[in-house]
Image (cartoon, rainbow, N blue to C red):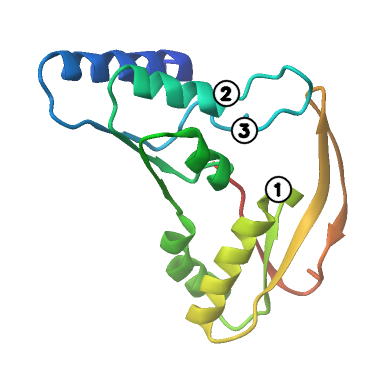
Amino acid sequence: GGPVASGDDKLVRLLLFIAALRDHGARRITAVTPYLAYARKDRRTKPFDPVSIRVIAQLFEAVGCDGLITLEAHNVAAFDNAFRRRAVNLEPYELFTAAAAKLVGDAPVVVASPDVGGVKRVQLWREALEATLGKPVAQAFVDKRRAAGVVSGGDLVTGEVSGATVLIVDDL
């Protein structure tokens, strides 16, 4: 697809490539998708909303994909439930732990999420950092809301961040 191709174009090209592989006798096909387009819409927020993660899963199944590997699914439970085939979510926080430990040194550390939806992601990274650093690591999140494409809030931080090195982790 290249850097100028849209996410839509890349997704369609990948689906067509998988279909071609299946048509030419591939026994097993696993797609590796570091960014899974449309996977963020994982629940209905309004009546009759499409759940795009499920539609994307159906597209991969329709072209004959046996499995899918992605990086940091927006909602791991929804990702797991959307696919009827093998689906693997890789968490990058494991890769960042050693680098972050070098950056923070002896300073107090807080791992923060820019919204409530990332609290579980923060908790997992905080636990990994605690094990690596051998000291307590706090956590925090920002009260942020999104409605009709408008982001509001952001003024209220839950958790103590004063005087600490704050590592902000978000999906994607």
Which of the pair 38/159 is nearer the observer?
38
Measured as percent of width and height from the top left, residue 97 is found at 47, 67
Q: Mark 2 and 1 residues: CB-CB less than 8 Å, in contact?
A: no
- The mark nearer the N terminus, 3 or 2, is 3
Q: Which residue is mark 1?
A: 117
Q: Which residue is mark 3?
A: 42
Measured as percent of width and height from the top left, residue 121 is found at 60, 56
Q: Mark 3 and 2 residues: CB-CB less than 8 Å, in contact?
A: yes
CA neighbours of label 3 inside 10 A, class few (<14), some (14 to 19), many (20+): many
- Camera sees residue 78: yes
In the rendered image, the quadrant that contains the N terminus is top left
- The mark nearer the N terminus, 2 or 1, is 2
Q: Is residue 120 above or below residue 46?
A: below
Query: For the residue marked with disc 2, what is the amino acid?
Result: Ser
Measured as percent of width and height from the top left, residue 71 is found at 43, 44
Name the residue located 54 percent from the left edge and 86 percent from the top edge.
Answer: 134
Badge number at residue 52: 2
Q: Residue furthest left?
A: 25
Q: Is residue 106 above or below residue 157?
A: below
Q: Is residue 83 above or below residue 125?
A: above
**Is residue 125 rendered to the left or right of residue 5?**
right
Q: Is residue 22 above or below residue 98?
A: above
**Is residue 47 rendered to the left or right of residue 155?**
left
Q: CA distance from mark 3 to mark 2?
A: 6 Å
